[in-house]
Image (cartoon, coloured by chain):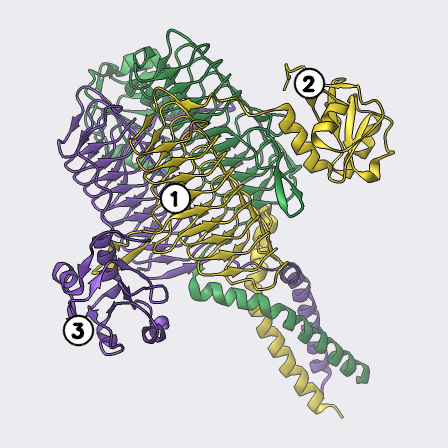
Chain colours: A yellow, B purple, C green
Amino acid sequence: MPDASPGFSLAEIAQRLGGEVVGDGAVRIREIATLAQAGPEALSFLTNPKYRAQLATTKAAAVIVGPRDRDATGLPRIVVANPYAYLARALALFNPPPALAPGIHSSAVVEDGAQVDASAAIGPLTHVARGARIGARCRIGAGCHVGEGVVLGEDCVLHAGVTIYHGCILGRRVIVHAGAVIGADGFGFAPEDGHWVKIPQIGRVVIGDDVEIGANTTIDRGALDDTVIEEGVKLDNLIQIAHNVRIGAHTVMAACVGVAGSTTIGRHCMVGGAAGIIGHLTIADNVTIAVGSFVTKSITEPGSTYTGVWSAQPHREWMRMQARLRQVEEMAQRIRALEQRIQELERKQP
Amino acid sequence: MPDASPGFSLAEIAQRLGGEVVGDGAVRIREIATLAQAGPEALSFLTNPKYRAQLATTKAAAVIVGPRDRDATGLPRIVVANPYAYLARALALFNPPPALAPGIHSSAVVEDGAQVDASAAIGPLTHVARGARIGARCRIGAGCHVGEGVVLGEDCVLHAGVTIYHGCILGRRVIVHAGAVIGADGFGFAPEDGHWVKIPQIGRVVIGDDVEIGANTTIDRGALDDTVIEEGVKLDNLIQIAHNVRIGAHTVMAACVGVAGSTTIGRHCMVGGAAGIIGHLTIADNVTIAVGSFVTKSITEPGSTYTGVWSAQPHREWMRMQARLRQVEEMAQRIRALEQRIQELERKQP
Amino acid sequence: MPDASPGFSLAEIAQRLGGEVVGDGAVRIREIATLAQAGPEALSFLTNPKYRAQLATTKAAAVIVGPRDRDATGLPRIVVANPYAYLARALALFNPPPALAPGIHSSAVVEDGAQVDASAAIGPLTHVARGARIGARCRIGAGCHVGEGVVLGEDCVLHAGVTIYHGCILGRRVIVHAGAVIGADGFGFAPEDGHWVKIPQIGRVVIGDDVEIGANTTIDRGALDDTVIEEGVKLDNLIQIAHNVRIGAHTVMAACVGVAGSTTIGRHCMVGGAAGIIGHLTIADNVTIAVGSFVTKSITEPGSTYTGVWSAQPHREWMRMQARLRQVEEMAQRIRALEQRIQELERKQP
């Protein structure tokens, strides 16, 4: 990605983001790139030790390294405790979000009684219903729907085509990606005479500060109480969060995860992609759930790791493994028969 | 959820929704809440026997109970055969859908030749293509697309950002949640010379009365014939229904289910979240498919329950279980060897 | 699906699409239908040998057959090497896409500095940001968002409600179905002091010619480098493609597949529905991954087939199978005991 900006000197970067400059702080940086792809105006980084050898061959102007790699290169460098987090900040410095002029686009529909902070930007063809409150510096993209009475804290970003149903509450600095749906009805029906009676879903979705929600992810409103996403939670794309779920602060979930109704997930958990968690469970803090695993019981031990996925194998091996399992019952019978025969022999033994 | 309405007396509720009032029918109700959370103006409910003890401690003004619990409390109460379905109706009474004034919002685009009933409401920034017919009292949210020739029966609700492709037919009282896509092309390609030739999908999606479709769910149009969702079906969020599937009346599917092409599912089935059903199968009526299960063969026995999910376990146990399975083949060999040795011993036996 | 067009004679069809006419080329065709459902003005087809017997009973006016079935019917027929691909083309002939008049709908918002070819059609309530370039004959549906600097090659089709984030590049003849999101941020966060720091995602999504992308599918932009979908790839609905994935030409994926970050998939692969592929893997060319399988290791052998799904079984059988697996460890102990006892017996043997 070429970057037309004048860039920064290495010293200027450290001035803004911290870190100790070792070597020539005047070297000019115009972009950020991997060690392998960096050119002579790029700042690179060593965040994964397996690339350390590339320090010797990179064409980068400078690198971000951790304290352990302070002397691993002669290039100008910024030494920091957490090079990965530093990289994140450096990328943000070189790639500021597109400036969206504050104000309401002429094609947007903002209903009477909606409050939009003067510093917020409402994109084209977006609808903000009455009673909604849009905080300072929010940026709402094109084609969104912000329902009646929705509250967005300061500095929220809604990308294009986001729907937020009536009454939902977002904290500050919440980022919602395109196509996400927040606050649709939870899935609740009472059986009666062979058909289903809809149970109105009158709770809300309440989202804390610094949450990020991926594209086409859905978070249902609560049935009676609220669905709650605590601060700092990061949800990837195409995730389903059912009604009355609570997700603890700073938990992350990779794409395609499903969490069924009324489950409570702890803080600082990590849920791998395509994992499933059934309803009415409690998951402790700091739990890791491996990709593709299906959690069917509460996990009470904080910090534990749960797994449940079978790895795909060459088709013939997979079939053989399944056949083995079918053998087990027959094997158990043969063992029983052997035990009887040997007992008989032992009995006859002199 | 506070409710500003004047509310109803218990007797008024029973007058509207049925049920027998036992105790003081004049008690005023302003909201509905669980036994644990109910305040002195709340109507609560006992729909799950495990909460029966809470009848003694609840602060509710009154409760909904079944015939068996008629005398389980001294609180004013409504006694009904099906308290859960009654709760659904009471919630609807206290939480009527937001009144949407009939008419076409000034920012909506309704093409010439579309017929919109005068009692229907077309939301802001929504597009209704030519030839579409919108029935009485339909409520179409913001930012929807109703394609050419689409028919919506009476009292349908499309939430924001719904897309209905050309030619699809919805019955009466169909609810479609935000981001759902009805009638996109089925996935059909003919291989030719190392690439794929698209097979035009010329069927439709035909949806019966009283169907509800969740947020970001996709239902593909048929290839030659139609994809059919019969009356009373309830689909949760992020479900994929492929071309030429037929889902029988009153079947429910939890979120993240996928059904592949040309499969026919019976009536009154229940499909758990994240289950998968491959193509060209037939599933009988009243079948239950457990969460996360993968159905690869037709299910011919009505009322049967199918399961296929492994529960996640602590990582070490899961690894040991997988190792055990690899042992099975070796164990079979050891059993064979034991059988030969014991046969030899028995032969030598006097 | 009735077709009001005057239709074509069989000979006219062959003139346009190729193939050899056998029998009366003057027979008039107004629609295309299966052998079972065809009426006297329908062209039918035999693409699956299991329907060959229907050739004798169909009411079709004519049929498409392969060379092997040249003499399997007395009906007028078109004989072609690949009847399935021919069917695709015949369907396209009889069902041309809805004519969308070129031009920008009056309700669309096209920013200054966007270039829209005069032959392209921009649908109602669609937003095209500055710097976007829309190629000749593109058809963009209602309610789309085409971000800043996006490039669409010639003859692309975006259905309603598609979002393409800034900077993404689409080749020619790309079809994107409703609700798909291309170019949302990849899921990247650096841990720091118990919270997550967002890593700006500055790569793009680059899509080759003749790609089709299903409804509500999400393809994330790259972190530093691009996410790449090569020419001819077909992705079904509700698929998740993470940042920096590369999918080789002409690979197809059925619905609900998830591919985690930085994985490279070969050309001409086939991935079954709901399969998952974890990150940082390499999958060879021509690999088949069965439905519901979870790939956790690179697949190096081209043309191989991988499987990993357990079929759902009647609940009791599934439970028994799981119980058997738990027995295996105990069985291993019993075998060990038997081996010792028999050794003892053998030792004592005269």
Residue pointed to by mark 1: A168
Image position, residue A330 (x, y; %): 56, 69
The amino acid marked with disc number 2 is: Gly
Spot the residue most to the bottom. Answer: A350
The residue nearer to you, when weighing B222 against A41, is A41
Q: Which quadrant would residue C300 be assigned to in this image?
A: top right
Classify 10 Å Cα crowding around label 2: few (below 14), some (14-19), many (20 and above). some
Amino acid, disc 1: Cys
Chain at numbered mark 3: B
Residue C82 shows up from this direction: no
Q: CA distance from mark 1 to mark 2?
A: 41 Å
Q: Position of residue C191 (x, y in %)?
A: 66, 43
Look at the image and tell me in which quarter the C terminus of chain A lies.
Answer: bottom right
Residue highlighted by disc 2: A7
Between C323 and A114, the residue placed more toward the observer is: A114
Query: Disc 3 and disc 1: Cα gap in Å?
Result: 37 Å
Same-chain check, marks 3 and 2: no
Please name whichever residue, B263 or B44, is drawn nearer the observer in this view of the structure: B44
- Residue on which disc 3 sits: B22
Q: Residue furthest top?
A: C118
Q: Are marks 3 and 1 on the same chain?
A: no
Which percent across, then down, holds residue B251? Answer: 29, 52
> Horizontally, is A337 left or right of B18 in the view?
right
Dot 1 or dot 2, earlier in sequence: 2
Q: Give the SS element for disc 3.
A: strand
- Residue found 63% across the figure and 59% down from its top: A304
Question: Mark 3: which amino acid?
Answer: Val
Q: Secondary structure at mark 2?
A: loop
**Residue in the picture at 33% in, 70% down:** B58
Q: Are marks 3 and 1 in contact (CB under 8 Å)?
A: no
